Image: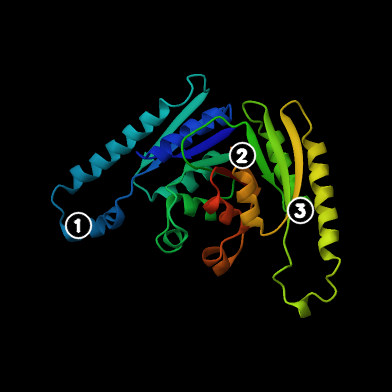
Amino acid sequence: MRIVVGVDWSDEAFAAVEQIGLLYRPDDVVLVHGVDLGMLQSPLVAGAVNLQGYDDFRQALIDAGRQAIERCRTLLSAETPSIRTLCEVQHPAAFILDSATAVKADLIAMGTHDHSRLTEVFAGSVSHRILLHATVPTLIVKGKARPITRVLLAAEGREDAIRLHTWLTAHPFKNPVAVTILSVVPSLHNVSEHLMVGLEGWSEQSERYAEQVVNDTAQALASPHFTVSTMVRTGDPVTTVCEVGNSHDLIVVGSHGRKGLDRFLLGSVSHGIVHRAGCSVLVVR
């Protein structure tokens, strides 16, 4: 398993590195640090402002980035077969995404500073941009690294469940875990009465379908690596998953990916879960 980790000098970055060591036995870890010079990243702008000591300033940031990477390297097990490092003057999010593509990563891991939703939309953050634009599964680590013993797998439907259990079986965790398979049936309580015509039996049918999905997924996951239980709830998917997730160490969810303006202003269920969950979230694509 090849994992790309975006790192800097933050506690969140160190936690992300430690977390992958607790969660997996990776074959190859690539630590990536993009040195962000802002407007001064452009030589033309740097030359125009005639910044005194610009070269020294630029080199100091590169050296600091390399030191951060070396600090992160010490957090990985000495038994990790391959640890590579990349440090360049690049926009951090773009550099992480490009590096993941170049090395054919199986997973991108990032710590999050847990900005407000409004700040993410208008100012952006590295983890937010990674979540929006990554084409491989993404682990967003929240808080301090911790052993993972209880995992919540939130499946929206049959196709989603297949993608999730395929990922889990192809990329096993370091240690056996207890997995709760959850499917949330959206509540129709807030739908106006005239829109409810013809939908009287919808909830009952949806609950039966959800029960079948979680039971089939439980059978597919059955192995010494997983102790499996199932759960079907009715309500708002994001709120329900986050509430159930409070008693778990990790939430695993699929990403369907909104397109266009919706993706940036409204987000998706997976993004909402990442933003509101109290534990780390693995988004499988």
Three-letter amino acid code at disc 1? Answer: Gly
Disc 3 crowd, CA 10 A, few/some/many (<14, 14-19, 20+): some
Secondary structure beneath label 3? loop
Query: 78 or 18, which is in the foreground?
Result: 18
Which disc is residue 105 wearing? none
Q: Under tag 2, what secondary structure? A: loop
Nearer to us of marks 2 and 3 is: 2
Q: Residue at x 62, y 56 (%)?
A: 238
Q: Residues within 10 Å of mark 1 (few under 14, many from 20)?
A: few
* Residue that mark 3 sits on: 157
Q: Distance between the residues labelled 2 and 1?
A: 52 Å
Please name the amino acid that badge 3 sits on.
Answer: Gly
Residue 268, placed above or below residue 165: below
Q: In the image, residue 61 lies at what x, y percent?
A: 27, 42
Task: Tell me the CA gap for discs 2 and 3.
Answer: 21 Å
Whether residue 137 can be seen here: no
Q: Circle 1 is placed at which residue position?
A: 47
The reply to whether callout 3 and callout 1 are in contact (CB within 8 Å) is no
Q: Name the residue under label 2.
A: 248
Identified at 72% across, 61% down, the residue is 186
Q: Of callouts 3 and 1, which one flags the residue occurring earlier in the amino acid sequence?
A: 1
Q: How far apart are marks 3 and 1 (CA)?
A: 55 Å
In depth, the one of 259 and 88 nearer the eye is 259
- Amino acid at the residue labelled 2: His
Give the secondary structure at mark 1.
Answer: helix
Query: Which residue ends up furthest to the bottom in the rendered image?
Result: 194
Q: Which residue is drawn at 26% across and 55% down?
A: 40
99 or 177, nearer to the observer: 177
Extreme residue in the top direction? 79
Mark positioned earlier in the residue sequence (2 or 3): 3
